[in-house]
Every structure is written in structure tokens, then in C-alpha cells.
Image (tube, rainbow, N blue to C red):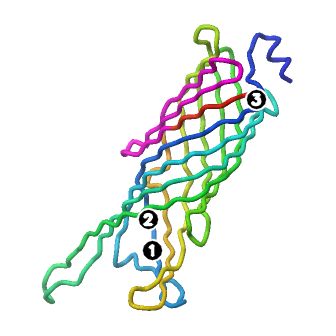
Amino acid sequence: MGDLATKRGIELPLPVGCGLVFYHLDRSIRIDDVRVGRNGAAPQSVSQFAQLSANAVVNNLNAKFDVWILPFVNVYAIVGYIWNQSETTIDVALPPLTPSGPTRTKRMTVPTEMEGTVGGIGITVAGGYGPFFMTFDSNGAQADLGFDDRFKAVVTSFRGGWNGKAGARPLRIWANVTDWNTDATASGTVPDPDGGSLSFEVDQGPAYSWTYGVGSQYAPTRHIEFATDTGFDGHGGWYLALVPVFRF
């Protein structure tokens, strides 16, 4: 169906692309429940004794392979590595020092670092009228960060913008809205300092799952594309993505 577009003077991208995707993500994490069990016992909730919250900084580098199977449908696969640094704040309720005294609280901050592999697949559907376009993109991925279960995520984006040229080469500028559906349960088993083992389950996800931002893509040649994309959640969270691609 590419001839239908080229006959109208539209320069379509070459069908196959190989590139890199780097993104930096900084956001607050919501922790809904924490369950702990000792020496094989079923984990029980401890959230009534402690309130937890976290901030995560993620750096991710992926190799990306994509194919335009129709002029308006692109499918792709990614595989890469992820680095995650988190800072968890724990507010613990302590009993009063005297029977009539006030309830006490203690705050602790625990830094953690994790890294591991990530992979996924996705699809982009595009359409437009005149110089304006809209796209829908959805991808599913899972990351192995050393827990019993892999983290799974579905990221869905809507983009709308202008498709034009800078000089003689294609330039696209857009606004974006993205839903980061990364709710997951982290589970595992660690040694108990007092002997035995402790199993844990942590229900967590982004405190604010929607981001809003802008992006652009420029193709200096038929074989090279470079895109940037950024967004903010309105509560201090943000991301930046850099995507160089070679097409053939």
C-alpha cells in the first residue's frame, strides 16, 4: 500500500529499522501493601505497623528492531538492560513510652540498587490528515531484577502533531500523553539476621501513572532518524527518551 502514499508526494520511512532506545525515568512509587513471612510461613501484611513510600530513578538502554508492515502499522521488539536506584521511606508507628503518652513514629530511609535485563514487543498505529497526524503506541515488557517473579509493564502512548520538513528533510513535532501501567508485586526470600529466612511480597506501582509532554523526530537522510521524547507527571516525576535509528 506504500504506492498510495508516494503517489501523493508523501515520503514514507524505509520499512526496516535497527536502533537504540535510551530513557531516563524519575518518579514517585506508591506502595500499597507489604507482607512478610518467616521460615516458610505464609506472608502476612505489616502495613498497619509501617507506611512506606519510595522514589525511583531508572536508566534503561534497549536495542530496537522495527518493521513497517503497512504504511500506518509498525511492529517492533526491544531487548536491553535496566538500572534502578530507589530510596524507600519507612514510617513506623511505635507504642507510647507511658500508658497515657502519645504514639511515637520513627522514619527510616533505605537506599537500594537493582539491575537486570528487559525485553518486550510493541505496535504503533498512525494516521493523519494533511500535515497533521496522530499515533497510538502500546508495548508490553518484562524485566528480570532478581525477584521471584519478573516485573511486567504495559506502556500506552497517544501522540498528535505536525508532519513537515526542515529544509528538504522530514521533521515531525508532537504532543504526547502516556500511561505507565507498571503496577507489580515484588516477591522474594532473604536471610533472617536472627536465623532462618524471611519471605516478602510488596505491592507497588507508580504514584502517578500518566505523563504529558512533547517530542520530535528528524530524518537527516533516508537511512537515519533521530527522535526525542519527554514528559512530566505534574508531581515532580519526569522522563526523557533518546532514539537513534538506522533504516534500510
Identify the residue at the far top of this view. 167
Q: Which residue is mark 2?
A: 31
Give how far apart the Cα atoms at labels 1 and 2 are. 8 Å
Q: Is residue 200 above or below residue 211?
A: below
Classify residue 63 as left or right of residue 72. Answer: left
Residue at 54% x, 48% y: name it.
60
Q: Is residue 2 above or below residue 67?
A: above
State the image quarter where residue 218 is shown.
top right
Q: Are marks 1 and 2 in contact (CB under 8 Å)?
A: yes
The boundaries of the magenta stretch are 212-240
Q: Is residue 80 above or below residue 31?
A: above
Q: Which residue is mark 3?
A: 72
Tell me the tag on residue 137.
none
Classify residue 189 as left or right of residue 153. Answer: left
What's under tag 2, amino acid-wise? Ile
Residue at 47% x, 78% y: name it.
35
Q: Position of residue 179 (x, y in %)?
A: 55, 46
Q: Give the SS element for disc 3.
A: loop
Give whichever of discs 2 and 3 has the lower sequence position: 2
Q: Is residue 220 magenta?
A: yes
Q: Give the SS element for disc 2.
A: strand
Is 102 in front, or is 153? 153
Give whichever of discs 1 and 3 has the lower sequence position: 1
Q: Which residue is mark 1?
A: 34
Task: Give the position of the C terminus as an image quadrant.
Answer: top right
